[in-house]
Amino acid sequence: MFEHFFQCPYCWEEISMLLDTSISKQTYVEDCEVCCNPIEITPIFQAHELIGFEAESLEQ
């Protein structure tokens, strides 16, 4: 597992999430721990190293 810090696309607070380095590319939705809005998370790993990361808001 890899802890990654980033800004929430809704409230702009810095939050962190644990990412699974064993999956090279994945997309899933998690709620912000501050404002509780859903964020689409897309981490990309190569050889267990984070090479790309997107955190997008889901328009409601």
Image: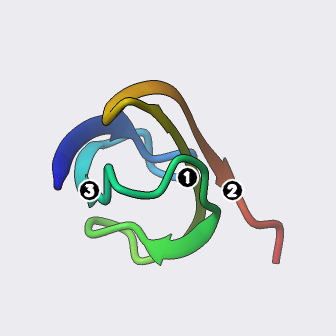
Between marks 2 and 3, how big is the CA–CA gap? 16 Å
Residues under numbered marks 1 and 3 in contact, where contact means CB atoms less than 8 Å apart:
no
Q: Is residue 39 left or right of residue 20?
A: right
- Quadrant location of residue 52? top right
Q: Amino acid at mark 3?
A: Met
Marks 2, 3: nearer the viewer: 3
Between marks 1 and 2, how big is the CA–CA gap? 7 Å
Q: In this rendered view, identify the residue nearer to me: 54 or 35.
A: 54
Q: Where residue 22 sits in the image (x, y, percent)?
A: 35, 56
What colour scheme governs how the chains and residues are painted in the rendered image of this protein? rainbow
Q: Amino acid at mark 2?
A: Ser
Which residue, given by chain and number where applicable, does mark 1 sit on?
Answer: 10
Work out whether residue 37 can be spotted: no
- Quadrant location of residue 4? top left
Q: Amino acid at mark 1?
A: Tyr
Q: Residue at x 82, y 78 (%)?
A: 60
Which residue, given by chain and number where applicable, does mark 2 sit on?
Answer: 57
Image mark for residue 26 = none
Work out whether residue 51 can be spotted: yes
Instruction: Look at the numbered disc 2 and give the secondary structure of its residue.
Output: strand
Q: Residue at x 83, y 67 (%)?
A: 59
- Which of the marked residues, 1 or 3, is nearer the chain's N terminus? 1
Residues under numbered marks 1 and 2 in contact, where contact means CB atoms less than 8 Å apart:
yes
Q: Is residue 47 left or right of residue 24?
A: left
Between marks 1 and 3, how big is the CA–CA gap? 16 Å
- Which of the marked residues, 2 or 3, is nearer the chain's N terminus? 3
Instruction: Look at the numbered disc 1 and give the secondary structure of its residue.
Output: loop
Marks 1, 3: nearer the viewer: 3
Instruction: Look at the numbered disc 3 and give the secondary structure of its residue.
Output: strand
Which residue, given by chain and number where applicable, does mark 3 sit on?
Answer: 17
